[in-house]
C-alpha cells in the first residue's frame, strides 16, 4: 500500500486528557486532521484506508534509555534470563557450543545471579568446563558485570599483570589470577573485540528493531555502551543506517555515545542531533557508578550485605567536570548515569556548574537517579534537570534490594516526589535489563509491585504515580528529552503519525491486566510497520 496519504478509520484516539472516536488522515508522514471518515475523504485523496475496528490508539511509545545492540544480543545469542543455577547456565552454553566451530564466540545476556539457587556469580572455571575451545562472554542483567572464560581473557590480553581501566575492576583470586569476573569498565576489554564484528552487530540491531515494533516503540533513545573506539562507533552507525533501510525504517533511533569518544566526534565535526528523520547523533553518555545487583553503585554508606564495599566510582569527578564542560561548550547534551546516592551527589556537583544556575538549554539529563533522598531531589529540581527512569526496576529488584541497601530503600525510586516537584521524568526499559514492553513498566509504576503482587502494600507505596502520568512518561516526556515535543509524543494535527494500536484501553483495565495488552499495529510516519497476526 502507498502510505503517503492514508486514512485510519474507526479508531479510539487518545489525545491527552480524553479520547476522540473517529478517523485520522495522514499526509507525508504527519497527522493532517482528525474527523469523520466522510469529512476526511472529502478533503483528502486517500491512497488507502485502514480500519482500526474501534481499537484504542496511543502515540507511539518512546523508550528514553535502551541499548539496542545488547537487546539484539538477547534475540540472536543466548538469552540467560530464565537460568536459575550455575548448572542450567552451563547446560545452555554447552548446547550452544555444539552449534559453533572452535574459536567462534559464545555470547550470553541477562543472567541474574540474584535468582540462582547457588547464590553465586559464575566464573571462568564454570565457563571453561563447557567451552574450553570457544571464547565465552556473558553479561549480567544489569550490564555492569560480565564474565569471560579463559579463551576470551586470552584474546583480550587479560592476565595477572593487566590493570583494569579506570572505573572498572578485574576480580582476582588469592594468587592474583583473573577469575573471569569483570566489573564495569573492565568489560570494555572484551567489548572492544566483539564490536569489531560489524556483521554480528547489524544482525543484533535488526533483531532489536523487530522487538521494538511489536511492542509499539516508535522512537528509541539508544546508547552504544562499551563502544570506546571511534572506528568501531562509526561502523556501528553504518550498521544502524543499513538496518533501518533494509527494514524499511521500522523505528526512529537517537544514538548516544560514550564520553571516551567525545573528542573524536568533535574532531570529525559531528554535531548533536546530526542526522535525518530516522537516525540522529544523540547525547554524550557519562557513567558515575554501576548497579545495585553487581554492588557497584556508588554509595555514601557501605552496602548492608557487604560492609567493606561502597561501590565503584566509574568516572572521577574531575574528569566529569572536564568532559561535561567540553560537551556543553560544543552543544552536546550530557546524560549521566547515577544509581547510588554518592554518585548522584557527585554528578549534581558537576551539572550544577554546567546548567548555569538552573538554566539548562541543552536539556542535560540524569539516567536513573535511583537512591535520591529529599535534598538531592531538590537539587535536581533547582538545576532544571530531567531524569530517565526505569519503572520496572521496582518489580525486578523488590525481592532483594533491601538486602543491599537496608533502610535506605525508603529513598529509592522516588518518582512521585520528583514528579510533584515538577521534575520531568521520561520512562524507559534500559533493555536488555528490563522488558521492552512499556506496559510492564507502567504496571510497576502505578502498583510498585512485582508480578506476584509483592509487596502487598507496594514498595514505597507513597511513590506510586497515576496511569496518565506513567503514560506521559513513555510518550510526551520522552519526546521532550530530545527537543521533539512539538513533533511527537502525542496525537495532534501536524505531529508525526507515529501511532500504536492496542488490544485494550488501559484506562478500562485493572492494573494487573495492563501487561496483557497487546500491540495490534504500529505505525511510523503513517506507515504500517507491524501488524499482529
Image (cartoon, grey):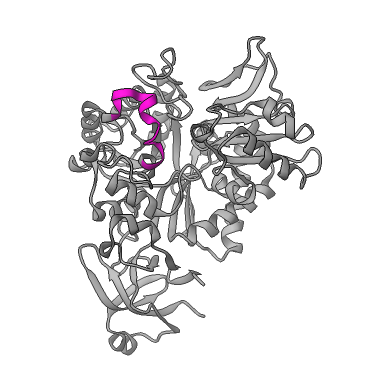
The stretch drawn in magenta includes residue 459: no
Q: Is residue 396 magenta?
A: yes
Q: In the shown orientation, is residue 227 left or right of residue 329?
A: right
Going 45% across and 83% down the picture, which residue do you hit? 48
Measuring from the top left, give residue 458's x and y in whole percent. 27, 41
Q: Quadrant of residue 264?
A: top right
User: Which of 159/142 is in front?
Assistant: 142
- The part of the chain drawn in magenta is 395-409
The residue depicted at 21 percent of the width and 26 percent of the height is 375
Quarter-of-image position of residue 227: top right
* Residue reaching furthest to the left: 420
Determine whether 385 is above or below 172 in the image.
Answer: below
Residue in the foreground of this view, choosing between 451 and 268: 451
Instruction: Where is residue 148? Give x, y as percent.
Output: 66, 30
Whether residue 449 sits left or right of residue 525 in the image: it is: left
Q: Main secondary structure of the magenta part?
A: helix
Q: Is residue 524 visible?
A: no
Does residue 189 appear in this view? yes
Amino acid at each position: 500500500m502507498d502510505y503517503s496519504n492514508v486514512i485510519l478509520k474507526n479508531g479510539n484516539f487518545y489525545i491527552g486528557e480524553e479520547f476522540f472516536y473517529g478517523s485520522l488522515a495522514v499526509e507525508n508522514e504527519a497527522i493532517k486532521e482528525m474527523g469523520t471518515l466522510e469529512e476526511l475523504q472529502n478533503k483528502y485523496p486517500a491512497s488507502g484506508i485502514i480500519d482500526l475496528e474501534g481499537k484504542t490508539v496511543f502515540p507511539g511509545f518512546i523508550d528514553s534509555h535502551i541499548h539496542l545492540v545488547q537487546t539484539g544480543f538477547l534475540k540472536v545469542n543466548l538469552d540467560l534470563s530464565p537460568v536459575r543455577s550455575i548448572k542450567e547456565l552451563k547446560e545452555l552454553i554447552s548446547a550452544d557450543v555444539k552449534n559453533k566451530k572452535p574459536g567462534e564466540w559464545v555470547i550470553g545476556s541477562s543472567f541474574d545471579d540474584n535468582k540462582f539457587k547457588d547464590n553465586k556469580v559464575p566464573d571462568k572455571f564454570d565457563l571453561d568446563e563447557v567451552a574450553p575451545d570457544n571464547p565465552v562472554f556473558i553479561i549480567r542483567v544489569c550490564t555492569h558485570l560480565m564474565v569471560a572464560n579463559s579463551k576470551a581473557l586470552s584474546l583480550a590480553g587479560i592476565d595477572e599483570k593487566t590493570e583494569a581501566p579506570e572505573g572498572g575492576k578485574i576480580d582476582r583470586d588469592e594468587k592474583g589470577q583473573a577469575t573471569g569476573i569483570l566489573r564495569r569498565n573492565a568489560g570494555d576489554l572484551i567489548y572492544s573485540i566483539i564490536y569489531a564484528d560489524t556483521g554480528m552487530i547489524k544482525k543484533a540491531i535488526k533483531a532489536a528493531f523487530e522487538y521494538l515494533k511489536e511492542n509499539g516503540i516508535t522512537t528509541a533513545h539508544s546508547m552504544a555502551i562499551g563502544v570506546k573506539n571511534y572506528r568501531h562507533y562509526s561502523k556501528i552507525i553504518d550498521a544502524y543506517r543499513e538496518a533501518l533501510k533494509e527494514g524499511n525504517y521500522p523505528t526512529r533511533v537517537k544514538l548516544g555515545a560514550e564520553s571516551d569518544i567525545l573528542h573524536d566526534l568533535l574532531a570529525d565535526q559531528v554535531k548533536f542531533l546530526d542526522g535525518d528523520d530516522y537516525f540522529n547523533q544523540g547525547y554524550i553518555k557519562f557513567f558515575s557508578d554501576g548497579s545495585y545487583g553487581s554492588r557497584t553503585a556508588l554509595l555514601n554508606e557501605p552496602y548492608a550485605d557487604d560492609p567493606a564495599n561502597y561501590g565503584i566510582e566509574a568516572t572521577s569527578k574531575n574528569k566529569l567536570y572536564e568532559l561535561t564542560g567540553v560537551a556543553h561548550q560544543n552543544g552536546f547534551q550530557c546524560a549521566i548515569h547515577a544509581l547510588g546516592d554518592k554518585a548522584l551527589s557527585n554528578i549534581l556537583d558537576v551539572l550544577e556548574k554546567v546548567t548555569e544556575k538552573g538554566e539548562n538549554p541543552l536539556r542535560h539529563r540524569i539516567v536513573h537517579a535511583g537512591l535520591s533522598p529529599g535534598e538531592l531531589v531538590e537539587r535536581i529540581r533547582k538545576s532544571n534537570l530531567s531524569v530517565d527512569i526505569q519503572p520496572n526496576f521496582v518489580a525486578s529488584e523488590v525481592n532483594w534490594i533491601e538486602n543491599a541497601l537496608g533502610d535506605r530503600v525508603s529513598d529509592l525510586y522516588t518518582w512521585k516526589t520528583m514528579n510533584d516537584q515538577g521534575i520531568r521524568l521520561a520512562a524507559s526499559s534500559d533493555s536488555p535489563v528490563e522488558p521492552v514492553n512499556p506496559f510492564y513498566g507502567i504496571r510497576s509504576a502505578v502498583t510498585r509491585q512485582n508480578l506476584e503482587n509483592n509487596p502487598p502494600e507496594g514498595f514505597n507505596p507513597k511513590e506510586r504515580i497515576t496511569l496518565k502520568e506513567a503514560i506521559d512518561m513513555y510518550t510526551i516526556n520522552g519526546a521532550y528529552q530530545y527537543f521533539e515535543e512539538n513533533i511527537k509524543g502525542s496525537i495532534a494535527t501536524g505531529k508525526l503519525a507515529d501511532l500504536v494500536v492496542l488490544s485494550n484501553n488501559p484506562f478500562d483495565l485493572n492494573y494487573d491486566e495492563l501487561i496483557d495488552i497487546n500491540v495490534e499495529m504500529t505505525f511510523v510516519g503513517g506507515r504500517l510497520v507491524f501488524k499482529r497476526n
